[in-house]
Image: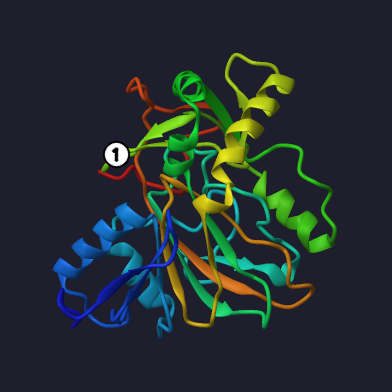
């Protein structure tokens, strides 16, 4: 069993990211260690566990230490026989090479996401993770005051680039087989730390009360602060690595820089709560259902 005296947390980025050394995720983990890992997650936003020997059951067990699990995705099929595991398979021509926060098009996006490296290309295929609280702090005061008041509509159905392959076209069809539109505050207050972070990303497609052109301009402006290099950590994968990140206050991006090589990760997500804005108002559904088939609302 891993105890609170037998592991170390080492910062790997100036504003985001730490490596957890000395924790065997396949073994029993002392509850005190889970508490310390959660505290590190709140501080560093993204944690990397190198060289783990986890199978599917082990990943599910580890993720469940942080709360009730969601199913794999609201619309995309899971790994066969594992309804909570989403295959992230670059070999199918389906690559998440855009900045996003997982599943923000539903009312209760995940609290946290775990990724497990299974097939890793010999070059490229990294994951970039950004600290949206640092981005918010970087905003000049007039922009912070504006952002605090704004709401954005997130959706899974928007003008994607044309699919390049038949598999990608089929994935796109499944992805939008149920349409969701949800209004979230542009600035989300973190439910555990009280930090404010920019809650936008690729699924945020419009600003409530503004037209398409003004919406795009404002979203690009705010997003440019999220993706400043100083707010990002780059994770270079090796097989067996596990990454845990706080989905409430980060965005991530997987560069499409590994040609036609295979890349396979498995994702398991922890159920989250309803986002709240600076004024305490909660996110609400604009179109679609409450996605209760996908996620419970965490207590």
90 or 250, which lies in front? 250
Mark 1 surroundings within 10 Å by alpha-carbon count, few (fewer than 14), some (14 through 19), many (20 or more): some
Residue positioned 41% across, 47% down in the render: 295
Q: Is residue 202 left or right of residue 235?
A: right
Q: Is residue 16 left or right of residue 170?
A: left
Above or below, comparing residue 60 to residue 43 in the picture: below
Q: Residue 254 sits in which quadrant?
A: bottom right
Q: How is the image coloured?
A: rainbow
Asked whether the viewer can see residue 270, the reply is: yes
Q: How many marks?
A: 1
Q: Quadrant of the N terminus?
A: bottom left
Q: Position of residue 8 (x, y in %)?
A: 26, 75
Asked whether the viewer can see residue 198, the reply is: no
Q: Position of residue 215 (x, y in %)?
A: 66, 24
Residue positioned 16% across, 68% down in the render: 31
140 or 145, which lies in front? 140
14 or 180, which lies in front? 14
Q: Residue 192 sits in which quadrant?
A: top left
Where is mark 1, residue-wise? 191
Residue positioned 54% across, 37% down in the render: 200
Above or below, comparing residue 183 to residue 134 in the picture: above
Residue positioned 44% across, 30% down in the render: 187
Q: Quadrant of the C terminus?
A: top left
89 or 210, which lies in front? 210
Q: Secondary structure at mark 1?
A: loop
Above or below, comparing residue 12 to residue 198 in the picture: below
Q: Position of residue 292 (x, y in %)?
A: 42, 42
């Amino acid at each position: 069993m891993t105890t609170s005296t037998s592991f170390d947390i080492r910062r790997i980025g100036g504003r985001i990211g730490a490596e957890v050394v000395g924790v065997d995720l396949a073994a029993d983990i002392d509850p005190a260690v889970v508490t310390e890992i959660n505290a590190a997650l709140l501080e560093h936003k993204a944690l990397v566990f190198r060289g783990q020997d986890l199978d599917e059951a082990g990943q599910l067990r580890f993720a469940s230490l942080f709360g009730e699990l969601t199913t794999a995705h609201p619309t995309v099929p899971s790994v066969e026989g594992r309804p909570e595991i989403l295959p992230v398979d670059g070999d199918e021509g389906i690559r998440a090479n855009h900045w996003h926060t997982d599943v923000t098009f539903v009312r209760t996006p995940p609290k946290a996401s775990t990724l497990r490296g299974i097939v890793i290309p010999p070059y490229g295929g990294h994951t970039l993770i950004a600290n949206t609280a640092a981005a918010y702090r970087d905003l000049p005061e007039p922009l912070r005051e504006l952002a605090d008041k704004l709401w954005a509509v997130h959706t899974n159905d928007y003008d994607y680039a044309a699919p390049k392959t038949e598999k990608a076209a089929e994935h796109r069809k499944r992805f939008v087989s149920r349409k969701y539109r949800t209004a979230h505050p542009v600035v989300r207050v973190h439910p555990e730390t009280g930090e404010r972070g920019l809650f936008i990303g690729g699924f945020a497609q419009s600003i409530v009360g503004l037209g398409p052109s003004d919406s795009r301009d404002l979203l690009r402006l705010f997003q440019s602060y999220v993706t400043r290099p100083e707010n990002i950590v780059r994770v270079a994968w090796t097989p067996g690595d596990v990454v845990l990140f706080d989905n409430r206050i980060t965005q991530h991006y997987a560069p499409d820089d590994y040609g036609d090589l295979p890349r396979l990760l498995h994702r398991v997500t922890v159920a989250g709560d309803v986002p709240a804005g600076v004024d305490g108002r909660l996110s609400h559904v604009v179109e679609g259902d409450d996605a209760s088939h996908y996620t419970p609302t965490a207590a």
